[in-house]
Image (tube, rainbow, N blue to C red):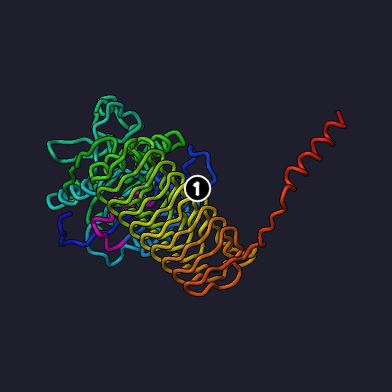
Amino acid sequence: MQARSRPLALVVLAAGAGTRMNSDLPKPLHPLGQAPLLAHALASAAPLEPARIIVVTGHGAEAVEAALADIAPEAIAVRQAEQLGTGHAVLQAADALEGFEGDVVVLYADTPFIRPETLDAMLAARDRHDIVMLGFESADPTGYGRLVMEGDILQRIVEHKDATDEERAITLCNSGLLCADAGVLIDTLRKVGNDNANGEYYLTDVPALASASGLTATAVVCDEAETLGINSRTELARAEAHFQALRRAEMLENGVTMQAPDTVFFALDTYVGRDAEIEPNVVFGPDVTVESEARIRAFSHLEGCHVSAGAVVGPYARLRPGAEIGNDAKIGNFVEVKAAEIGEGAKVNHLSYVGDATVGARANLGAGTVTCNYDGVMKHRTVIGEGAFIGSDTMLVAPVTIGARAMTGSGSVVTEDVPDGALALARAKQVNKPGLAVKLMDRLRAIKAKKG
Ligand code: UD1
Ligand code: MG
């Protein structure tokens, strides 16, 4: 992104009812790529390093504001009590923009695919014009506002409902995104009335009103796919497919190997390093980092975790929040790891649960090892030292510490700490009864034969 001399503020409209979602969840919070739609709108502008972020809330304001505090704690939420139109919505940001000198970009919480490069092009056009709208060519423009251009000057925008037949023939549509100087935008919005087919205060009246005061407006044109808005579950499902297609292409471009990219699902914030390999049917939840040359094998599910270079995870592994997998470590089939650091080169290869634990470098956890971390009320930690060898089917009853290079016998229930280098045996001693197995079976067969 180009360095800009003028500071940037974002105003994100997130007040609408989203009636067609048919949901109790406010539309800006519906997930796309495991992140709320609102997070996508903010992510598209993040590379432009906005100095101020204002989100206009209304329907479901409390929930939207709580999510916002998580996504962008620096953002300011302003309420639009009644949804009187897009112009009215932006005007609610007037107080929050008080004293701000710079440009404002208006974004929409339900429009997640805007590329940072497009916003950059709008800001570049602002160097030559006072108002910049984002438009797109549509094969089916019905319903959209139309951009009435004269050369590169945007004369005005006419909403579909208010348009003449001649104006409806225009295929250059309004995306709704706008860029203007903060002072100019607020001053112009104060002049907007609601004398139109919807009785609303239209943001789209801004270009014509600005022109009337001797200012100029223009349009930057982007691909229609970028302006895709989400109004229904069907559109949300389509958007998810589109999001995944974009992320898969981006991953391949960045040097990630995938044999069946169409079966891999990414989250908005998934990071995968160069030369990492993602096998088929892997699902990424939020907040996952996979470093270079790590391998995530088929049918694994990862969220809130970090996989270091050279590590192998899966097939059929589950990494939950706080799983920190060290370099060249191995997490095998049907292994679940939560809030645990697995040291460099350590192995947890089969059928294990490792939660609230620290596993030292090169430790080996045998099949069926379980950290019993939960006593029904509280969680406790297990610490396993470097190079320790945990026998198969060991129950590690936390809090417990296994020393470096210590061992546990298979089937042990370990409730006490094991010193460095010690072997812990915590299981019943084996007793052999010669001939008893055959005798027992003969007796059982005889009983069955008598019953007929
Ligand atoms: C708007 C544009 C239209 C454009 C279209 C692109 C206006 C008047 N029209 O029409 O030119 O082609 O978007 O999709 O701007 N919102 C609020 N508060 C309000 C009203 C709306 O926050 O009082 C939010 C909505 O939640 C939505 C967005 O603003 O996210 C756009 O509003 P919507 O009612 O969908 O406008 P359109 O009629 O689609
Ligand atoms: Mg709309």
Looking at this view, is 444 or 134 the one in front? 444
Residue 378 is a magenta residue = no
The quarter of the picture where the C terminus appears is top right
Q: Quadrant of residue 137?
A: top left
* Vertical order, 178 against 158 (above or below): below
**How far from the left and from the top, in percent, is residue 37?**
40, 47
* Vertical order, 328 against 388 (above or below): above
Indicate the secondary structure of the residue bearing disc 1.
loop
Task: Magenta stretch: give its range.
Answer: 39-52
**For this view, does 371 lie left or right of residue 324?**
right
In this view, the residue farthest toward the bottom is: 419
The quarter of the picture where the N terminus appears is bottom left
- Mark 1, ligand 1, within 8 Å: the answer is no
In this view, the residue farthest toward the right is: 450
**For this view, does 246 lie left or right of residue 89?**
left
The crowding category of the residue bearing disc 1, from other C-alpha atoms within 10 Å (few below 14, some 14 to 19, many at least 20), is some
Residue 48 is a magenta residue = yes
Q: Mainly helix, strand or loop, the magenta region?
A: helix
* Vertical order, 192 against 71 (above or below): above
**How far from the left and from the top, in percent, is residue 284?**
40, 47
Could one spot residue 237 in this view of the protein? yes
Q: Quadrant of residue 404?
A: bottom left
- The residue singled out by tag 1 in the image is 334
Kindly identify the residue that appears in the image at 19 percent across and 42 percent down. Answer: 220
